[in-house]
Every structure is written in C-alpha cells, then in structure tokens.
Image: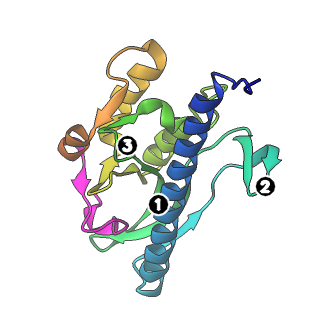
Amino acid sequence: MPRRRNAGAGKQHKAAQARSVASRRGAAFEKALEAQHAAYDQQGLAFIRHSPPKFRVTGQAGARCSGFFEGAGDGDYTGWAVVEGRTVGLHFDAKVIGKDSDLWSFARLCHNKRAATPDQALAFDACLRCGGVAFVLLAWPLVTVLVPWADLREAWWRWYREGGAPASLSMQGALDMGQKCRSRARWLEAMP
C-alpha cells in the first residue's frame, strides 16, 4: 500500500524554505552593515551599535530553530553620526525585501507580530522629539534606500491606527520619499 502524504506538508516545507532564504539574506545584510559601521567608526564618522530584540527559541530540529521575538523591539540600530559637521543621535531599523517583491509591508516594523505593538514607531518618534534622526533602511536586491521616519511616520501611523491602504511602501515610493544609498550598506551619505 502506498504511503499517504500529508497534503499540507509540501506548502509548509516551501514556506520554511522561503523563511530560511529570507533569514540568510537578512544575515548577509546585517554582516555588511556591521562591516560598514566598523569602517564609519574607524573614520570617526559614526558610532553605531546593533541591538535586536531578544528571540525565544520554541523548537529545534537539527540546525534549524523556530521561535518568536519577545517583548518590545524599538529599532535594531542606535548611535551617533557626524552629519554636516554636527553630531546627531540616530535610531534606525534595516529591512531586506526579497527579490520576488517590490513592497515593504508596514507590519514588518512591528517586531512582535503576535501583539503588533508599535514599539519601534514610538522609539523613532521619541528620537525625533529629542532632535535625533530616525529612519528605516530598506534593502531591495539592487538598491538600498534610506527612508527618513519624519517622512514615513504619518502614513505608517495612519495604517497602524486605521488599517487599510497604504499598508506598504513600494521601491519607487521609498525612492520618492528617501535617498538611494551609494552601495548596499553605505547609508551615511544618504542621511537627510
């Protein structure tokens, strides 16, 4: 008698593979950012630290694990940079958008997707109130765009509070709102 396959297993496997590829893309981008941040630090241009939210592992199978982000996530990167001769505080998050999508979903700014909390948006708003610069660094396969929170915040908060459109930002929308970076991880020259 032939072995019966679980009909949903194929879809689950494909979804897991897609998450794995996205995770590797994100890790590669983080590595490029770390190298660029070290170069900025050495040149005396910026001091940036990576502080992602804590991740709770709920299961493990070989080299793979599953889990979720715990609690608040208020932005992955924080620090200071010299912009036009003055030192400014920075707070930002970096997101990788896959090759199969032109859109960055606003929901991706909520680390804790179970609770969909606006912790990062609140932290970005606080940074702006204190005279700092907050932004989202969006990396598509061929272009990275620095989108200032001051320009994005109104649309993002409208989406968060009311739902509906726009619920995402296209690459062209990001380019219209922000600045194209010189290379994958060189964002300082694109600062507002």
Q: Residue flagged by tag 1: what amino acid is it?
A: Gly
Q: Earlier in the sequence, mark 3 or mark 1?
A: 1
- The residue nearer to you, when weighing 187 against 169, is 169
- The residue nearer to you, when weighing 104 against 58, is 58
Q: Residue flagged by tag 2: what amino acid is it?
A: Gly
Where does the image place residue 127, in percent across and percent down from the top left?
48, 48
Depth-wise, is mark 3 or mark 1 nearer the camera?
3
Name the residue that disc number 2 marks: 62
Where does the image place residue 55, in percent across and percent down from the top left?
73, 48
Q: Main secondary structure of the magenta part?
A: loop
Name the residue that disc number 1 marks: 89
Name the residue that disc number 3 marks: 149
Q: Secondary structure at mark 3?
A: helix
Q: Is residue 94 above or below residue 173?
A: below
Q: Secondary structure at mark 2?
A: loop
Where does the image place residue 15, in percent across and percent down from the top left?
56, 36
